[in-house]
């Protein structure tokens, strides 16, 4: 396709892909998992999972996308032209999985909007609205989810360079800056060091198969793998970009943000405890992660007086920015398919697909107890690793090794002849699937 959209610069791509990767998974998921899984032990296993498993698969997904330079269904078909129907199904599976992820992600992001707006409403005297925004209820969940989905649709409607790239390059630096300011602030508060100790001193008694499985799931979710997101972003990447290096920068940025989020959230929990907020339940276990972020932290901000209000607003702005740069990457998957497979206009595709995802999300909102946890587990613990493994098998077994290397070599010929890139196709072919099977066995 001659005039297909592309990211306009390499840094634009890196920030957009890192924007997809950095999200609630880093700021909410990673720190709370680390907190309840032995702190530094979880961090160590997580790093291993990111670099031994997720990074090679990130390269695989980006490579398929850039090779295909098309929507995921067509890209996958180019990898295995003789199995068009099967490849169509794999692409469809990724598209359904990512739409389901977006439908629960938008609910959680909606809560964040509520926590952002509540103190502002309270400050201007709209007290009952403030309470409504913070209290769990189907009406609130629905309306806030719709607002968040509307934001997502507005960005994706403007396309790749003017929508996704422009907003990611604006929002990501703001996010990093806000983050650093908050970490510095939190670390100067009483109680913060206890959180740091929990985070950085390993407690090996937590090392267990469950921890390894959780770390793998977290790595897949965090790098947005297995649901065609990175494939679509790879398809907008210029042929001259150095793919392995770019992927490494994305993985490093994502991991750095998760690490810094740990430096923020764990100390913040103990600052909250110092201020009288309960963070452990009766059995001595840390409160569930949603309770932590959605009730412990706001309570902590409340106890901090006027400064707390500003810190709280900053914190939720940060979370919403991170969630938005992720949700736009999710919506882009089905939208790119509708544009290229069904020849639709972008402005049409975003609305009906966004609308459909809102309907799924609304069904979850009104059947929250029965559906929310199930959708999260099915998509993140099963769909992402399984579809990710299918991509690895495709690259490793179906695609001719020379073709893979040819694709990687574009942009940076010397890299492909290095030892690492001679090994990589074999690594994706054998080591990745075996590692993943092992982890599944542990489960
Ligand atoms: N990586 C995002 C996060 O850590 O919050 C979540 C995500 C984005 C998952 C995009 C899947 C996806 F396709």
Image (tube, rainbow, N blue to C red):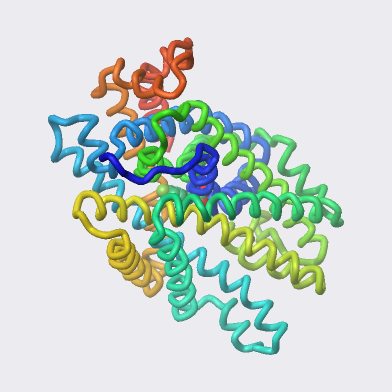
How many numbered dots are placed on residues in this image? Answer: 0
Instruction: Give the image quarter of residue 292.
Output: bottom right
- Residue sitting at 70 percent across and 35 percent down? 202
**Residue 167 seen:** yes
Quarter placement of the N terminus:
top left
Report the side of 44 relative to 166 (left or right): right
Q: Position of residue 335 (x, y in %)?
A: 31, 55
Towards the viewer: 74 or 85: 74
- Residue sitting at 73 percent across and 38 percent down? 200
**Residue 383 seen:** no
Report the side of 127 relative to 342 (left or right): right
- Residue sitting at 85 percent across and 56 percent down? 189
Q: Is residue 17 above or below residue 361?
A: above
Q: Position of residue 171 (x, y in %)?
A: 59, 55
- Residue sitting at 41 percent across and 59 percent down? 158
Report the side of 345 relative to 330 (left or right): left
Q: Is residue 176 above or below residue 38?
A: below
Quarter placement of the C terminus:
top left
Q: Is residue 382 above or below residue 171?
A: above
Q: Position of residue 280 (x, y in %)?
A: 69, 58
Instruction: Give the image quarter of residue 127.
Output: bottom right
Q: Position of residue 79 (x, y in %)?
A: 24, 30
Q: Is residue 309 above or below residue 221?
A: below
Towards the viewer: 432 or 276: 432
Report the side of 88 relative to 232 (left or right): left
Towards the viewer: 82 or 277: 82
Outermost residue on the front side: it is: 3
């Amino acid at each position: 396709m001659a005039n297909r959209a592309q990211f306009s610069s390499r840094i634009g791509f890196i920030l957009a892909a890192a924007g997809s990767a950095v999200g609630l998974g880093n700021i909410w998921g990673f720190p709370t998992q680390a907190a309840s899984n032995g702190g530094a032990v979880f961090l160590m296993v997580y790093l291993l999972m990111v670099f031994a498993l997720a990074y090679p698969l990130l390269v695989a997904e980006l490579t398929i996308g850039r090779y295909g330079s098309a929507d995921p269904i067509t890209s996958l078909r180019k990898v295995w032209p003789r199995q068009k129907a099967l490849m169509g199904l794999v692409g469809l599976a990724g598209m359904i999985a990512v739409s389901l992820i977006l439908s629960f992600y938008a609910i959680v992001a909606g809560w964040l909007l509520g926590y952002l707006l509540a103190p502002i409403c309270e400050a201007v005297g709209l007290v009952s609205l403030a309470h409504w925004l913070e209290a769990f209820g189907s009406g609130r969940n629905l309306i806030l989810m719709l607002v968040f989905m509307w934001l997502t649709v507005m960005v994706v409607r403007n396309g790749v360079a003017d929508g996704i790239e422009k907003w990611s390059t604006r929002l990501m630096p703001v996010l990093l800056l806000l983050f650093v300011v908050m970490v510095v602030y939190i670390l100067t508060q009483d109680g913060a060091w206890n959180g740091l100790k929990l985070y950085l001193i390993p407690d090996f008694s937590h090392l267990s198969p469950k921890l390894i499985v959780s770390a793998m799931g977290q790595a897949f979710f965090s790098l947005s793998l297995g649901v065609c997101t990175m494939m679509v972003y790879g398809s907008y990447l210029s042929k001259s970009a150095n793919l392995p290096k770019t992927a490494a920068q994305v993985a490093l940025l994502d991991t750095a943000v998760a690490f810094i989020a740990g430096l923020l959230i764990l100390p913040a929990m103990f600052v909250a405890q110092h201020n009288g907020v309960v963070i452990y339940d009766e059995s001595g276990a840390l409160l569930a992660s949603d309770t932590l972020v959605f009730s412990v932290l706001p309570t902590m901000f409340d106890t901090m007086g006027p400064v707390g209000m500003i810190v709280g607003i900053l914190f939720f702005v940060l979370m919403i920015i991170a969630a938005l740069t992720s949700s736009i990457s999710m919506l882009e998957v089905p939208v790119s398919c509708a544009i290229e497979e069904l020849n639709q206009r972008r402005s049409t595709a975003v609305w009906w697909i966004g609308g459909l995802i809102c309907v799924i999300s609304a069904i979850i909102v009104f059947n929250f107890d029965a559906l929310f946890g199930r959708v999260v587990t099915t998509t993140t613990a099963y769909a992402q690793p399984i579809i990710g493994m299918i991509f690895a098998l495709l690259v490793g077994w179906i695609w001719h090794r020379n073709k893979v290397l040819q694709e990687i070599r574009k942009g940076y010929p010397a890299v492909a002849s290095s030892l690492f890139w001679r090994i990589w196709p074999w690594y994706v072919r054998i080591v990745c699937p075996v590692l993943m099977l092992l982890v599944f066995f542990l489960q």
